[in-house]
Image: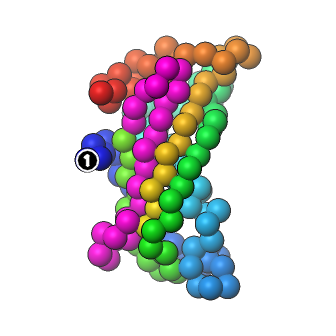
Amino acid sequence: MAKYIFELNMKVRDYECDLQGIVNNANYQHYLEHTRHEFLLDHGISFAKLHEQGTDAVVARITMQFKVPLRSGDEFVSKLWLKKEGIKYVFMQDIFRASDMKLAVRAQVDTVCVVNGQLGDSPELNDAFQPFFA
């Protein structure tokens, strides 16, 4: 069972859809990233500040499963929970169509940090995320 720790409401814009009238697959990555960034901001973490301090959090791998398509004007809820595996921060993310709460996308986003040019752990992120690690 997912243990969501953050959610964000959004709405599909016309230009995000393809000729079939559904959200183009690449746009789901934008939704997922926006959710992660809002989660970080909600917890007082700024990407710009991390970068200035020599830490860059980057996506190492992403897997997505498409379930039910979203269409122009659909409102949706993007939810996430987080776990730590070694030096990876693993974001488990689900997007639900708001009208019926059907799962549209399920994703796993593995992120890592480059700290002062070296792959490694981020003490700032570890501290901020500690309450969420199982």
The answer, for residue 126, to whether it is visible in the render is: yes
Answer with left or right where residue 72 lies relative to residue 130: right
Q: Residue 13: x, y in percent?
A: 56, 74
Is 109 situated left or right of 20 in this image? left
Disc 1 designates what residue?
1
Q: What residue is drawn where x is 42% and y is 60%?
A: 95
The x and y percentages for residue 57 are: 61, 30
Write down the quadrant of residue 3 in the picture. Answer: top left
Q: Position of residue 67 (x, y in %)?
A: 45, 68
Residue at image point 54% right, 55% down? 64
Left or right, residue 81 beside residue 1: right
- State which quarter of the image contains the C terminus: top left
| Residue 38 at least partly seen | no
Residue type at numbered disc 1: Met
Q: Is residue 47 magenta?
A: no
Considering depth in this image, is 93 or 76 the residue closer to the camera? 93
Secondary structure character of the magenta stretch overall: strand
